[in-house]
Amino acid sequence: MTIWNPWHGCRKISPGCANCYVYRRDESIGKDASQVTKTNDYDLPIKKNRQKEYKVTPADGIVFACMTSDFFLEEADEWREGCWDIIRERRDLEFHIITKRIHRFEECIPPDWGGGWENVTICSTCENQDRADYRLPILLSLPIKHREVIAEPMLGEMDIEKYLVAGLIEHVTCGGESGPNARPCDFRWIKEVRRQCVRTGVSFTFKQTGAVFVMDGKTYHIDRKLQIAQAKKSGYSYTPGMGMADKIVYTLPDRNDLWARLSKSNFRSRFHLSENDRKYVVEKGRDTIRKHAEDFVLKRLASENPENDGKQTPMKGHPVFTAQHATACCCRGCLEKWHNIPSGKVLNDKECAYIVDVLMEWINREIAKSPER
């Protein structure tokens, strides 16, 4: 990885900027980060050594541009054309441009941009739902070869699946906020965006916890040096087809606790076996119903990314379908929320058996009840 800062300094434009690390760092040395200046590294990608070879090579990895500013900042308009010339010259390098100013993109591109350059990835940030709904439609509408989304710092729950389904966004990164005034990042938000990425086949990176991390209702204050390591250790980054979720460590819920939680859910607790369902279970026998459950779990739930996940289980038509909704075993998202089984992994035999056991226990409980409730 190479950091290329052709200019330094920026203006804050959205909630994600409030605790900007550039402002914080500059203030510590008596500088004003709102003052934008051209740097000595302006031509870094084309600098050469004594052998007249480029100092930055493809082996150095991705070149991240303007990490202490914004590539599309208005104050840098006079310098940007020269940067495009550099990027054009170094087509052997992969450039990533992270911006909060995707709305300025079209007025800032070179005349030969066309449908985009193969060696340039444009990464639009969106720290909350409001900024996602403003910036991502713009990102999708632009002539760009490679698009990514960065929700960092993540400041709230976000639904971006409607933007991911277009198939134009290649990667999503989420992470918490660092620094002494960091705002909380809830693991629930991270997992929900990850589930959206799994359902749409988009790669996902959980980059860092941030300094204030909320998990299972508890707030943790994470030391700066551990924030990236802890996120990596969680195993919640995801690349389709790579089996990465198999490394996630989790614990299945205590069964008594599960029934207690389900009983408190207005949605889950309204499901019951109909009289026809009861008769079907009695006529077919428990062993046959279990085989049906095993078949439904294998065909509709077990794959890494089930087809129509979230909509694959009918609301009625079979006792097992009713049991799936009643026990939150109806889709991979519910399995993760209620049973801790991570989405994005192929269910193993133990997990499948657990789900079937839960379904059959619920059915047995229903049969044991009086039909008149």
Image: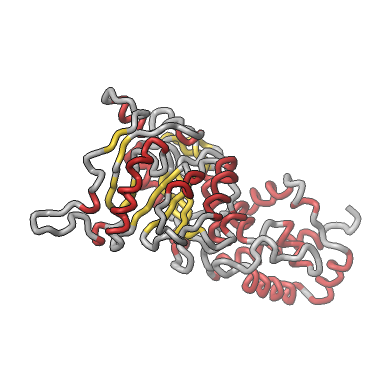
Which residue is at the far top?
30
Name the side, left or right, on which 269 lies relative to 45: right
Q: Position of residue 54 (x, y in %)?
A: 18, 57
Quarter-wise, where is residue 310 in the image? bottom right
Nearer to the camera, 183 or 280? 183
| Type of colouring | secondary structure
Q: Position of residue 292 (x, y in %)?
A: 71, 74
Q: Is residue 303 above or below residue 13?
A: below
The answer to whether residue 307 of the structure is visible from this angle is yes
Q: Residue at x 78, y 75 (%)?
A: 285
Q: Is residue 40 above or below residue 172?
A: above
Nearer to the camera, 70 or 340? 70
Disc tally is: 0
Quarter-wise, where is residue 30 in the image? top left
Nearer to the camera, 65 or 325? 65
Q: Position of residue 307 (x, y in %)?
A: 63, 69
Which residue is at the far front?
111
The answer to whether residue 252 of the structure is visible from this angle is no
Nearer to the camera, 333 or 326? 333
Q: Residue at x 47, y 69 (%)?
A: 241
Quarter-wise, where is residue 242 in the image? bottom left
Which residue is at the far right?
372
Q: Residue at x 49, y 58 (%)?
A: 143
Name the side, left or right, on which 166 lies relative to 229: right
Q: Position of residue 246 (x, y in %)?
A: 46, 63
Q: Residue at x 22, y 53 (%)?
A: 46
